[in-house]
Image (tube, rainbow, N blue to C red):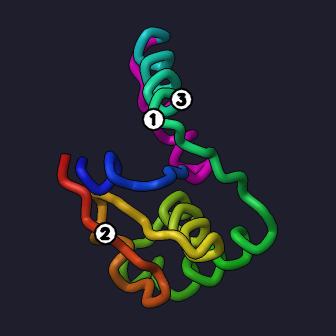
């Protein structure tokens, strides 16, 4: 958690944000997710044409060999397009993406 706490700024792809909200099991959990992201001052990065195109390329390259899924492709593409590091607890699917700066996260 230190890498997140010590970051000068924090951002989250729109795809990651949607996945967090989708994983909420109650309205209270949904609100807790939103509150935490607001408190930690996360910027939500919208999807755009370049991110979509890059995600498509990643799916073409890695969906069969590494089981990369559309959501993870969008998350990786957002980080690469915004020239940001990706901090993730799910590094397995992201490893083959050479232009992605990936930091493993262990809560």
* Residue span colored magenta: 12-26
Left or right side of 88 for 52: right
Please tell me how many numbered marks the rendered image carries: 3
**Image-quadrant location for residue 29:** top left
Residue 8 is a magenta residue: no
Residue 40 image label: 1
Q: At 73% across and 76% down in the image, what residue appears?
A: 53
Residue 107 versus residue 30: which sits nearer the camera? 107
**Mark 2–mark 1 CB contact (< 8 Å):** no
Q: CA distance from mark 3 to mark 2?
A: 22 Å
Where on the picture, by quarter, is residue 77? bottom right
In the displayed orientation, state which residue is furthest to the left. 106
Q: Residue at x 43, y 66 (%)?
A: 86
Residue of label 3: 38
Q: Position of residue 17 (x, y in %)?
A: 54, 41
Q: Which residue is at the far right?
A: 49
Q: Is residue 16 magenta?
A: yes
Distance CA(mark 1)–CA(mark 3): 5 Å
What residue is at 58 percent from the left and 53 percent from the top? 13
Of residue 78 and residue 21, the one placed in the foreground of this image is 78
For the point 43% across and 90% down, the residue is 98
Whether residue 106 sits left or right of residue 38 in the image: it is: left
Viewer-nearest residue: 13 or 10: 10
| Residue topped by disc 2 | 103
Q: Earlier in the sequence, mark 3 or mark 2?
A: 3
Q: Are marks 1 and 3 in contact (CB under 8 Å)?
A: yes
């Amino acid at each position: 958690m230190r890498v997140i706490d010590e970051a000068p700024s924090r951002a989250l792809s729109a795809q990651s944000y949607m996945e967090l909200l989708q994983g909420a099991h109650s309205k209270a959990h949904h609100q807790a997710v939103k509150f935490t992201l607001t408190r930690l001052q996360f910027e939500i990065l919208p999807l755009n044409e370049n991110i979509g195109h890059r995600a498509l390329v990643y799916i073409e390259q890695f969906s069969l060999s590494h089981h990369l899924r559309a959501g993870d492709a969008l998350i990786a593409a957002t980080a690469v397009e915004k020239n940001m590091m990706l901090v993730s607890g799910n590094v397995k699917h992201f490893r083959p993406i050479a232009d992605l700066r990936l930091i493993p996260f262990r809560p």
